[in-house]
Amino acid sequence: MHIPTHILSGWCAADLVELTPRERVFAMVAAAIPDVDGLGLLLSFDYYNEYHHVLAHNLLFGTVSAGLLALCSTHRLKGFILYFALFHLHLVMDLLGSGPAWGIRYFWPVSSHDFQNPYGWELSSWQNTLALAILLAWTVASARKRGRTPFELLYPSLDREFRGIPRVRSGDLVSGNEPNPKQKTKAGG
Ligand SMILES: [Zn+2]
């Protein structure tokens, strides 16, 4: 499936668990990180064709990436379980919606067996559009209910915009920024 769909799958799953903002970012990373092997496209289409769905779409990469993210997490065990599960959710989503020709070499490099799903649908399909729409609706509903968005840590100002928190004035937001030094001086006499 498309990378934004994978990222949102990580966000929505993390939204169901008690985590820190950084761990929620890690969950989005874990859900999308297998597609790092698609960066071969920057070198050549042949390289992309050869190694996409191979180098990072396998058990070894999933275990290592989930382990590294868990090491940098506050809730290490819970984080590892979630990141590992999200990695596999990515593989399932790919088997469903990346096109029947794109298999997964799950046990690479030990085995090159290519697991395929003959019933999968193409990347450009209504099913993938529907999946993205559902995840987006979930994200919007969560922003209203829990007051957070996928931008909470990386783009706090965008996060506030999405949640509809108005600005008081340029550079100073309602939720908790320190007043500027001039104000402090006046207040303190
Ligand atoms: Zn993928």
Image (tube, rainbow, N blue to C red):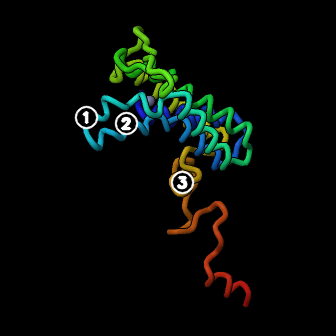
Instruction: Look at the image and tell me in which quarter the N terminus lies.
Output: top left
Instruction: For mark 2, give the secondary structure.
Output: helix
> Horizontal placement of 127 versus 124: left or right?
right
Specify the amino acid type for callout 1. Phe
> Label 3 belongs to which residue?
154
> Horizontal placement of 16 versus 157: left or right?
right
The extreme bottom residue here reads 189
Crowding at mark 3 (Cα within 10 Å: few <14, some 14-19, many 20+): few
Q: Is mark 3 within 8 Å of ligand 1?
A: no
The part of the image, by quadrant, that contains residue 18 is top right
Q: Name which residue lies at 54% across and 61% down.
A: 167
Q: Position of residue 118 (x, y in %)?
A: 40, 9
The extreme top residue here reads 119
Specify the amino acid type for callout 2. Gly
Q: Position of residue 162 (x, y in %)?
A: 52, 47
Nearer-N-terminus badge (1/2): 2
Specify the amino acid type for callout 3. Leu
Q: Position of residue 148 (x, y in %)?
A: 62, 45
The span from disc 3 to disc 2 (Cα, nearest Å) is 24 Å
Query: Relative to the observer, which residue lies in front, 143 or 155?
Result: 155
Q: Position of residue 155 (x, y in %)?
A: 52, 55
Mark number, residue 26? none
Is 86 rendered above or below residue 178?
above
Nearer-N-terminus badge (3/2): 2
> Label 1 belongs to which residue?
45
> Horizontal placement of 98 versus 23: left or right?
left
Query: Relative to the observer, which residue lies in front, 100 or 155?
Result: 100
Mark number, residue 38? 2
Nearer-N-terminus badge (1/3): 1
Instruction: For mark 3, give the secondary structure.
Output: loop
Q: Name which residue lies at 61% across and 38% down.
A: 66
The quadrant of the rendered image in which ligand 1 is seen is: top left
